[in-house]
Image (tube, rainbow, N blue to C red):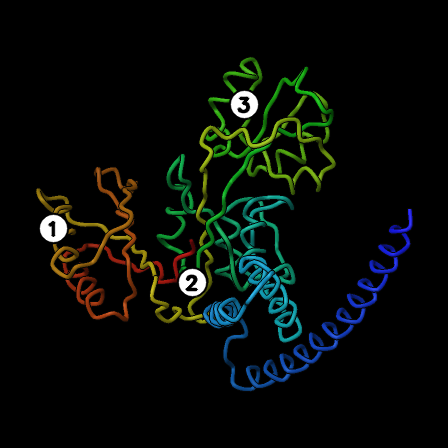
Amino acid sequence: MSQQPIQSEALAGLRVQIDSIDKQLLSLLNQRAHVAEQVGEIKRAEGSPFFRPDRVAQVIDKITQANTGPLKNEHVASIWREIMSACLALEAPQRVAVLGPQGTFCEQAAIEFFGSAANLIYCANFDEVFHATAAGTAQYGVVGMENSTEGVVARSLDLFLRSPVHVVGEVSLLIRHNLLCQTNSDAGIQVVMAHPQALAQCQGWLSQHLPLAERRAVSSNAEGARLAATNPTWAALASERAASQFGLHIVHHAIQDEAYNRTRFAVICLPQTLATPPASGKDCTSLVVSVPNRPGAVHDLLVPLKNNGVSMTRFESRPAKSGQWEYYFYIDLAGHPSQPHVAAALEELKSLCAFYKVLGAYPVNE
């Protein structure tokens, strides 16, 4: 009995310390914000880009290397990304187009890359994300590129062909699909709605647990959640964020068929908004090419890579829709065009192609 007042006094004392430290932190953060405003004025006068993902990465890398705990490095990185995002918003808020409505994994990827202070513009589909970014409505866009279970997001690849935007970064998210509905039970569910990729990623679970329910494809998982909130017999496959956004119950957690289910999102912009980021030491160069329809043409594409010691990490084909059985090939290479061996391989490769376009060179997100 006598220990309780002593413990309460100790706890009260620790809380006073925390309150004092919080005030110091706030003062230091505002000092940092004032300096960031001065940086913004200089950038505005010079016409240089406000958002520099390579600079963000450098700061976070430096601060995590200096970390001695007990905070974990990944938590320190998250805190500093938000600090830098808030300071950047004082310099110039970044307009970022994402797949909407609120609660999509695309939104989550944008927040992970830009921080929560970014001004998000919600689009109905990836076509609108590309258009908003190319037209200048948004300075940046975030689009799905590839899922570890279902492969490439074909529409995004097609849109890159004729869009003037390029890739300046990527975000890799662990995707967990949850079954959401109005009540805390899956009884009476007649329709399950989600993006086609999500439906495919959960088809085994749905076949086993809801075999009679209609699977209805919608523009995004969050849109499915929005619709599920209007009808008690409808359910959605979406994130915990979407459940909170639309007031739905999470009836079943993480129902994707593959436990390790990741999606790569590309960060896109016009070259005049942000040029190709400098080499980071661990980069990816993405390109799309086509070759004349002749025997051995595809094999010949690989020769410059082998001769120059460049590793290919992805190779996808998409029909050219010309009616002539022609294809575009989407290739990811390990490395950056500023590296001599990569530059030599790209130069040789270009000479073999009927169509050649570098989609971007950017740091790999792990």
Who comes first in sequence, dot 1 or dot 2? 2
Indicate the secondary structure of the residue bearing disc 1: helix
Residue type at numbered disc 1: Asp
Residue located beneath label 2 in the image: 168
Mark linked to residue 300 = 1
Q: Is residue 132 above or below residue 16?
A: above
Q: Could you give the CA–CA distance between mark 1 and mark 2, rounded to whole angstroms?
A: 28 Å
Instruction: Tell which residue pokes out farthest to the front in this image.
Output: 2
Is residue 221 shown left or right of residue 355?
Answer: right
At x 15%, y 48%, the residue is: 292
Who comes first in sequence, dot 2 or dot 3? 2
Residue type at numbered disc 3: Arg
Q: Could you give the CA–CA distance between mark 3 and mark 1, rounded to whole angstroms?
A: 43 Å
Q: Could you give the CA–CA distance between mark 2 and mark 3, rounded to whole angstroms?
A: 35 Å
Is residue 195 shown left or right of residue 350?
Answer: right
Mark linked to residue 215 = 3
Who comes first in sequence, dot 3 or dot 1? 3
At x 12%, y 53%, the residue is: 303
Q: Nearer the viewer, residue 339 or 97?
A: 339
Please provide percent x and percent y for residue 177. 55, 34
